[in-house]
Image (spheres, coloured by chain):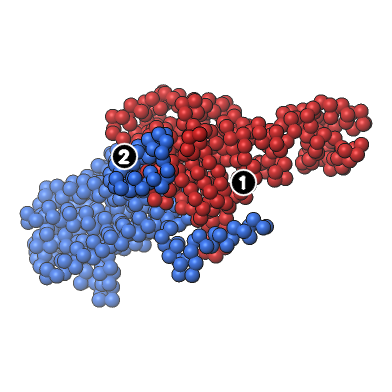
Chain colours: A red, B blue
Amino acid sequence: MPEPVIVTRNLVKSYSVNGSKNFVAVDGISFEVAPGESFGLLGPNGAGKSTTMRLIGAVSTRTSGDLTVLGLDPNRYGPEIRSQLGVVPQENNLDLELKVRENLLVYGRYFGLPRARVARRADELLEFAQLQDKATAKVDDLSGGMKRRLTIARALINDPRILLLDEPTTGLDPQARHILWDRLFRLKEQGTTLLVTTHYMDEAEQLCDRLIVVDKGRIMAEGSPADLIRRYSSREVLEVRFGSAQNAEVADRLQSFGGSGFGERVDVLPDRILVYSDSGERELERMTAAGLHPITSLVRRSSLEDVFLRLTGRNLIE
Amino acid sequence: MSAGDFDNARDAGGATDSIRSQAVAAAVVSAARTRRYGSWYVAEHRFRVMRSYAQTVLFTAIGSSLVYLYAMGVGLASLVDGNLGDNAVNGVSYLEFLAPALLASSAIAVASEEFSYPIMLGFKWNPTFFGMNASSIQPGQIINGIVISVAARMLLTCAIFSVFMLIFGAVPGPLGAVAVLVALLTGLSFGALLMAYTATLKDDTGQLAMVQRFVILPMTLFSGTFFPLDVLPTYLQWLGWISPLWHGTELSRVFAYGRPEPIWLSVLHALYLAALLAVGWIWARRLTAARLNKCGFRRRSSLLLARHGCSEAVVSVSITPVMRAA
């Protein structure tokens, strides 16, 4: 196996808040990312994903633990590491005073690339990001999805070995998300290592070969999406609604029904009940046979959302 | 990074396979250029931004030169010279007395524009500094690049102004050209402080407008610009002594028309301006490093912790198990 491009061991990052109390944003995280791998950090807002990204991006100093990127320590070799990274931050920080293409030109120079090469690369990337027609447009006139694609194009100007994507599709409409995912797939095919943070489980399932589920600065689980679902959830989930007033009461009956209850497990959310099972349809039939008639019912595949709920007892998006 | 460092880095990382050692080799080459020329790359970026408002830059440079030289140097001057004679102030005409001061003020005007809102913009409103920081650029280089680009605009503005001074016949001596450099130093020394102050602001809730009104305007009025400082009552003269504009104006006049002044005082003016520039520049670089690296300035924070008898590592280790237990 090739040597990992990112290695973290017991990585800790704490901030002092108001000079006294310590807030631990990243609390002993350890993982490795292999070259060409697409690795995800899945977790709710405030889980420490972005802080981890900043540590790996060599723009924040760790409090303790070990971290190497391409075998180099960011504390010593910040500019060297950053020269091989492409960073797509959560908030776009494109220069609004410059035109679309100019944003790529000035950014390419930051990596010491000759002007002619940057210009050539900028044109290639505008094509890759499907923004050729917008080369001389003002950044402000672009749609949210276009700005995101421009930010990704900018992150690729130095042909990075590792692309860091912090919440790449947050705030985008479904169509824009799919265009973006398609572009990221292409990069993955070309062998770029992707590190993605997200709180969307569908995004993690789409993009990541392997991921860690993070909560409160700690790793809750690690594995491929399918692996995690197999380990922490059932094949299918039956979602039933009995009306918010009755959900809890019905859930008690479901859990104790016939001694072993329905499915492998039953979870109650404020608005619905989840029944985990190999076959959702079978559970629904049993339910109807027992005289329980939900207002609505839905059988679906298990997702990472269910994994997260199982691991933390909370929803991913609250 | 030297070749020896490179080997250390490679050994430390154990980069024996090709993918990683290739990456490290590329990183070293690429980052070496940025470590050396990064400040110029930032300046290049700023020049491109300035090009988008090049008309404003030229229009203010030419327009304000004309307006001030006409209004004060011709209009007000006719009144002053009419009453006091051709060698009205310091033994020269009012226009000759005034012009070097206006030159220094025009540098201050550029500084107050370029070192305030654009800094706020880069940190907050359109956080391009964070974008630069994610590349191989280092925080200090962002500040250097801004200083370089503003210095260029300031030099252009002052050069245009000095051409108008020549046209208006306001420069009797050949050393007048040196006054342009004095104006540049004046503008940058005040500007560096303003830049550092702006870098401390998390939000603009009117502070920058207050600086305009209560720092820059009074400074222009009480720095011996329109009248010599010694006509003010003694208890107000300290306003001039602390003002970089007064020091710049006084020095500028020495070169423009040979205003008599002991040499040590001229040296003092230059040193004072250079000191302000250094303080502001270093302060701004530190603030920027701290702001772009959210953990704060590592060296300083570990010093702080060391003073309290512990190191950063110890703090986090002692806290981690507690959090785990909880």
State whether residue B50 is above or below residue A208.
below
Q: Residues within 10 Å of mark 2 (few under 14, many from 20)?
A: some
The residue tagged 1 is A219
B191 lies left or right of A188: left
* Residue A173, position as x, y percentages in the image: 58, 30
Residue B260 seen in this snapshot: yes
- Residue at disc 2, secondary structure: helix
Q: Residues within 10 Å of mark 1 (few under 14, many from 20)?
A: many
- Residue at disc 1, secondary structure: strand
The residue tagged 2 is B29
State whether residue B3 is above or below residue B258.
above
Q: Residue at x 67, y 43 (%)?
A: A318
* Residue B145, position as x, y percentages in the image: 30, 47
Tell me the quarter of the picture where residue B95 sits. bottom left
* Residue B32, position as x, y percentages in the image: 30, 43
Gap in Å between the C-alphas at discs 2 and 1? 36 Å
How many numbered discs, if any? 2
B94 lies left or right of A131: left
- Whether marks 2 and 1 lie on the same chain: no
Residue B206 image label: none
* Residue B137, position as x, y percentages in the image: 36, 45
Q: Residue at x 46, y 36 (%)?
A: A162
State whether residue B38 is above or below residue A147.
below
Tell me the quarter of the picture where residue B247 sits. bottom left
Amino acid type of the residue that numbered disc 1 sits on in the rendered structure: Ile
Tell whether label 1 touches label 2 (CB within 8 Å).
Answer: no
Q: Residue at x 63, y 33 (%)?
A: A225
A233 or A128: nearer the viewer: A233
A288 lies left or right of A297: right
Task: Give the letter of the chain under mark 2.
Answer: B
Amino acid type of the residue that numbered disc 2 sits on in the rendered structure: Val
B323 or A291: nearer the viewer: B323
